[in-house]
Amino acid sequence: MNSKECSQLLLSTGRLLSSTVCLCASLMLAGCSVFGPTTHTETAVIESAPSALDPGPAPQPAAPEPVLDTLGLVAYAASMQGKPYRTAGDSPDEGFDCSGLVQHVFGRFDMYLPRNAASMAAALPEVPFDALQAADLLFFNTQGGPYSHVGIYLGDGRFVHAPSPRTGRVIISPVSNRYWRNRITAARRPQPTAFASISEP
């Protein structure tokens, strides 16, 4: 190969390299125009997207269960001692029958029990006699039915009740009294949550 041919070859190679460089530069500029900078809108979307690690709002604490003021209820029930007996009575001023007394006392503590003794026994959970607590209800068979009389247990073996027109008043009696011991039939435990669906009579 003579010197003239070598010169032509070098010139062709240089032109090819120059064309290649121009082509690469054009592709790079085109790429920048296609994949331009992130716009403000895109940035806002990215920033507003929830994080996978975000736990979300904290759960609300559960509402506390209502608690019966047992000491207050028992003290109030005992304070009814001496109030007059009245058939179908349910107030301290007019007098009480047995279920009227129970309903009135528990109503003062926002618990609205059924009006008669049998309905109370049917609505409330049973309690064994060896597990009695203050404010439990005691039921007796005094008129041929297992739930014909009801009183409020005060603790220490005593209960408050409105026995009959013959007695004539609300009294406190020992459960160990032979008459009541031979007639007791059941015990029930009123719970505040058990009466969410029972409306005030």
Image (cartoon, rainbow, N blue to C red):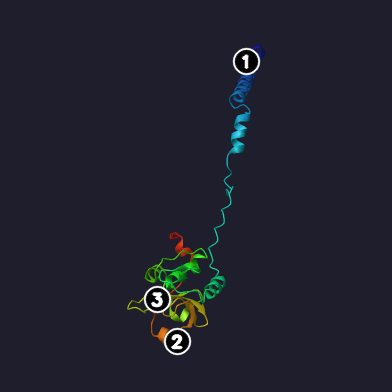
Residue at 58% x, 39% y is 49
How packed is label 3: few (under 14 Cα within 10 Å), some, or many (20 or more)? many
Which quarter of the rendering shows the N terminus?
top right
Q: Nearer the viewer, residue 5 or 165?
A: 165
In the rendered image, residue 40, in percent from the top left (x then y), is placed at 63, 29
- Disc 2/disc 3 C-alpha distance (Å): 15 Å
Among numbered discs 1 and 2, the one appearing first in the sequence:
1
In the rendered image, residue 47, in percent from the top left (x then y), is placed at 62, 37
Q: Amino acid at mark 3?
A: His
Dot 3 corresponds to which residue? Answer: 149
Q: Secondary structure at mark 2?
A: loop
Tag 2–tag 3 contact (CB < 8 Å):
no
Residue at 46% x, 81% y is 130
Relative to 31, 181 lies left or right = left
Which quarter of the rendering shows the C terminus?
bottom left
Residue 38 appears in the figure: no
How packed is label 2: few (under 14 Cα within 10 Å), some, or many (20 or more)? few
Relative to 161, 32 lies left or right = right
Among numbered discs 1 and 3, the one appearing first in the sequence:
1
- Disc 1/disc 2 C-alpha distance (Å): 129 Å
Q: Nearer the viewer, residue 195 or 151?
A: 151
Q: Among all residues in the image, which is located at the extreme left?
A: 144
* Disc 1 versus disc 3: nearer the observer: 3
Residue at 55% x, 74% y is 79
Dot 2 corresponds to which residue? Answer: 177
In the rendered image, residue 109, in percent from the top left (x then y), is placed at 52, 65
Q: Residue 12 bears which disc, if any?
A: 1
How packed is label 1: few (under 14 Cα within 10 Å), some, or many (20 or more)? few
- Disc 1/disc 3 C-alpha distance (Å): 122 Å
Residue at 39% x, 69% y is 116
Q: Is residue 77 above or below residue 20?
A: below
Q: Nearer the viewer, residue 16 or 120?
A: 120
